[in-house]
Image: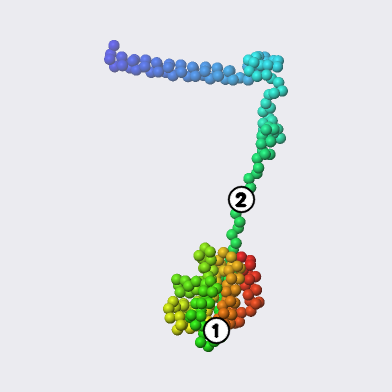
Amino acid sequence: MDKELLRVVIILIGVLVMIGMVLWHFVKSLRYKRAADDYYDEDSYDDRTVDEFAVEGEEDGLGVFALGDDLVDGDALLDDKAIKPSPKAAVAARREPEKAVAVPAPATSRTHLPILIEFSIVARADQGFNGEDLFDAFERVGLRYGSVRVFERVDANRMVDFAVASMVDPGTFPDTGLDDFYCPGIVFFMQPREVDNPLAVFDDFMETIDTLADALDGVVWDNQRQPLTAETVAQFREILATA
């Protein structure tokens, strides 16, 4: 046999074998698919098959649990009305005191208060107030000579409630040569927004001014450089009382 003819025959035999294998796999897959469809066919089930698994009597065949009134109702677990706490849990809930929730007190706004209150004492005498007299009077009312060379009212926390300055520029008092120092008046400053109790500080502020005005023989002026009246003082007290 010619070699070329032999080669062609071998090739044809190989092709036929491959075609046969493909057809065999195709037929096999169709057979498995038909068997699966028959297995899940609903018509193959009947009431007889279901009855074989029915539990008869008050106990199941395995004796795991009794089929009685003590069974848990699954639907009741989804019913809010059927969920009731046990008596012990209810008693414990009643005995446990409710914890009060601390609500922080709102911070009091002081924007309505005046930024500065400024009153003055002006000397009746033409020469004004002498330095020695001023230091003695300030010491008697408890004012302290501060680092900025003005007198201050210092509270228990070492905070300044109000200050007293001189009407002579730059407003300071000398620490030496007091016999030669004179000033036409003294100025009192208070910042209501910066103190803890504005009304109490203002009352001390006014009491100090009245005491010094009597001791130094001076006239009290308001911030408009007019004689201070009781009505003006009452208006400031009313405003500061809201802090």
- Tell me where residue 149 sits by quadrant: bottom left
C-alpha distance separating marks 1 and 2? 55 Å
Give above or below for 37 relative to 241.
above
Would residue 103 be found to the left or right of residue 144 on screen?
Answer: right
Q: Please state the horizontal and vertical placement of residue 78, each as a whole percent of the image.
A: 67, 33
Find residue 136 and report its horizontal and vertical position in percent. 51, 77
168 and 111: which one is in front?
Answer: 168
Please rate how many residues cluster around mark 1, counting C-alpha atoms within 10 Å: few if below 14, some from 14 to 19, many from 20: many
Q: Residue at x 49, y 17 (%)?
A: 28
Kindly state the secondary structure of the residue where label 2 is placed.
Answer: loop
Question: What amino acid is labelled 1 in the image?
Answer: Ala
Query: What's the residue at 58%, 18% (across, down)?
Result: 39
Circle 1 residue: 123
Residue 24 numbered mark, or none:
none
Q: Residue furthest bottom?
A: 126
Is residue 86 or residue 12 the one in the foreground?
Answer: 86
Sequence order check: which comes first, mark 1 or mark 2?
2
Q: Residue at x 58, y 69 (%)?
A: 201
Quadrant of the drawing holding the C terminus: bottom right
| CB under 8 Å between discs 1 and 2 | no
Q: Position of residue 168 (x, y in %)?
A: 48, 81
The amino acid type of the residue labelled 2 equals Ala
The quarter of the picture where residue 178 lies is bottom left
The residue tagged 2 is 102
Residue 83 in view, yes or no: no
Q: Nearer the viewer, residue 229 or 82?
A: 229
Q: Nearer the viewer, mark 1 or mark 2?
A: 1
